[in-house]
Structures are given as structure tokens and as C-alpha cells.
Image (tube, grey):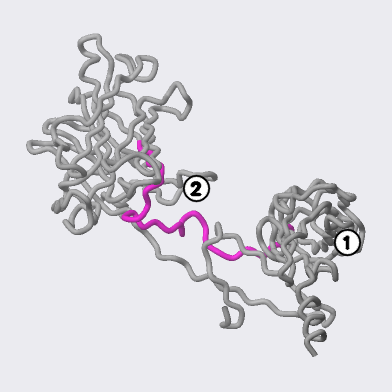
Amino acid sequence: MKFFKLIIFLFLAIPSFLFGADIQITNLKVENAVTPIGLDVSQPVFSWQMETSSKNRGYYQNAYQIIVTNNLGHEVWNTGKVKSGASINIKYKGEKFKSTTLYHWIVSVWDQKGKKYSTNSWFETGLLNPKMVTNTDSDKETTAWSGAKWIGGNANDMVLYSQYLPVFVINSTIQLDEKSQSTKASLIYGANDERLMNRNKNQYKLEKKKGDSYIQVELDINSLNSDGNAKLNVYRVGYHPNDKKDIPLKSFSIPNSIINKENKFNPHTISVQTCLGVTKIYIDGNSKENLVANLNLNPLGAGGDFVAFPVVGDIGFLVSKGEKAQFSKIEIKNYRSPSNVIFSDDSNSSSLFSSFKEVSIENNNYVVTGGNNGAFVLANPSQHSMPMLRTVFGIDSPKISKARLYVTSRGIYDVYLNEKK
């Protein structure tokens, strides 16, 4: 009996690799996702894991092979046997993908003893580049969005919540009044930020009232009268305890090639482009030569590591006592491509600033007069709410076995089909 027990003990103590390890290839991913649908990458990366259910840890990958085939079974990539232990970030180097196409792939792995293990998975391409040919049964070439039945609004339906947007472009044209020899006028934005009006919502415990916090971009041509340069003065008011209402945060000299004695009373377009506080201001164009100011307006720091200031907030105009200016072509755009217009004011009887007594409308321009006390005009440009879009379709052919719904909204949407998410 003791001899029998000894045999059993020795049997259990023998290393499992002498009997062969139970090895599996698992966790197959394409572009770091399991069986992705709507893949829009032309050269995705492949990855997998080599696992064993036994306690033996001595096995490892010595070589691999990837074979990718399309939905017709045609081979589009074959790495051949590659002597390598790599199993992540293996970049695709096969034929160009077709859009809306199902692809299968097989990965084979050889261990250090030359034993081969294989498994498979799949992925499906999205629309890819809209100019690429879709996967159709006919030989006729079509673009990826051909036949798409679009639902949604137009440019007049763009949504803007000005208290939320910290990445934006604001454009406005300013024309100083020649008759009154006016020298200054300002574009205002970032005003009445709700966070600055509640001491519990900002780091400096500020609690500003309406009109006490804003960014002011001032066009000042006064120095041209003494052979100097026009200036662009940028004020930050109410964002930091040290902000001054009457002292610019920073002043910039405007080159004579942009504004000079001859054109100082002409219309000049100011373009403010801000991304999380990092702000560039252009005058009369968006080229390098038209860049007049480059600064950070966020009192907490520059970039995405900080709470973002300013947002669009309320926008408007500031014209000092005795001064007069015209403002026109006011628009707010997305900062990032394609930089769509999300707000545009047409200077008509029902427009954003038409109800202010300091403002009159002449030839589709806002005429703002400072009078005896100056004019400080603010309004909220927010418009529309998030849309709920609906469409109805029917299935006429009994031959349809599957379908894909392609939706574009920069990834921010919920889709329901027959009331089910």
C-alpha cells in the first residue's frame, strides 16, 4: 500500500509540460476592440493573448501568422509565419479595405516547441473615407454616403449653450465713426459666467453681479494721431481678484499694414479664436500676418489640465462716452474643423441687440452710441435645444437578412429603433 501511494505521489509531482500544456489563444482584438463594427481605420492594429489553464508558466510564443479574408473569402493579407514573440500592435499591411465590409481573420501561434495553435475572429469596416468605393454587388462605383437618407436640421438649427462652450471662434466687424472722430470700440464676450457669479463655483470665491465679469477686446486707433500704431487692448474683468476694469491685461501693437491712417475708419474684422483660454486674435484675415494677439486668458492656467475659462458667455459691445461705432457680421463658430457657424446675427428688427436703447440699426449694422454715459450692451446668444430627430422606413424586400444603421454626430448621440435603445 505504501508503495502504491508513493507511485501516486510521484505521478502528481511530475511537471505538467511533460504531458503537454492546455494552451489557448484568446482576447483577439482589432484596433483594441473585440469584433469592432464600423471600423474607420485604414491600418488597424491586431492583438491577442496566449493563455494556459495549467499551472505551467514556461510556455511562450515563438512565432505567429495572421490571415485576413473579406466577406467573399478572398485573402487580403497574409503575414506568413513571422518568428516573433510580439502579440500586440501588429499593424495591418494588406490590401486597402472596402467600406461596410465584413472581414474574418485567423491568428496562428507557435510555441517554443513548434506546436501550432489557431483561432479566429472578425471585424467590420465603417464608411471609411467618403470618397472610397462601397461594397456593392454591382461594379458601379459609388461613394460611401451615396443613397444616404439624411435627417436633421440646417445651419439655422445649430445648438448653442453659451455658458458651456470653452472652445470657439467669435467674429465681428467694427467700424469707428469718422464723423465724430471716434477712437475706441470694444467687442465683449465671456460675460456673466455663472461660475463667477457664485462664490462656491470658482477657485477665488468670487461672486460677481451682472455685467461685472467679461473679456473685452478693444480696437484703439488713438495713437495713429501721433504717428504711432493702433493698439489692440485685451481686458479681463472679474475673473481674478487682480483683474482691473480700466487697465488692460495685455496690449498689442497693430501693424500699419493692417490698420493705418488711411483705413482707420474702414470696417475691420476681429476674429477671436480661443481654446480652453489659449486665445489668438486676428484682424482682417486669418493668415500669420494678421495674427495680432496670442495670450492665455484663463486665470487658472493654460490648456486642458485646468478648469476652462472663458466660455462664450454673454456677448456684446462697449463704446465709451462720446464715442460711436458700428458692429456687424457677428458670428460664433466651432473652433475645430469644419468650423461650422453655430450662431449668426443678421442685425434686423428681431435680432439679438435690437431692443437696446443704445443700439440702432442702419444698413444691417448695429450703430452703438456712447452718449453721456457710455454704452455697455450684453445679450445671451444661446439658442435651440438638443434636437430629437426621427425618420420612418419600411422593408419591402423579403430577401433582406441584415442591415446596418450608420449615424454621424461626432459620436454624441443615442439611437432608438421602435422605441428600443
At mark 2, the secondary structure is loop
Q: What span is colored magenta in the figure?
A: 146-172
**Residue wearing tag 1:** 116
Q: Residue at x 85, y 64 (%)?
A: 117
Residue 107 lies, with reference to residue 379, above or below; the image says below
Q: Name the residue nearer the viewer: 43 or 421.
A: 43
Residue 128 lies, with reference to residue 173, above or below; the image says below
Q: Residue at x 85, y 71 (%)?
A: 19
Q: Earlier in the sequence, mark 2 or mark 1?
A: 1
Q: On the rendered structure, is 12 left or right of 187?
A: right
Which percent across, then down, holds residue 395?
75, 80
In front of the other: label 2 or label 1? 1
Residues tagged 2 and 1 counted as in contact (Cβ below 8 A): no
At mark 1, the secondary structure is strand
Which percent across, then down, holds residue 139?
90, 56
Q: Residue at x 76, y 73 (%)?
A: 13
Residue placed furthest toward the left: 372
Q: Which mark is residue 340?
A: 2
Query: Type of residue at label 1?
Result: Lys
Q: Which mark is residue 19?
A: none
Query: Type of residue at label 2?
Result: Asn
Is residue 106 part of the magenta span, yes or no?
no
Residue placed furthest toward the front: 2
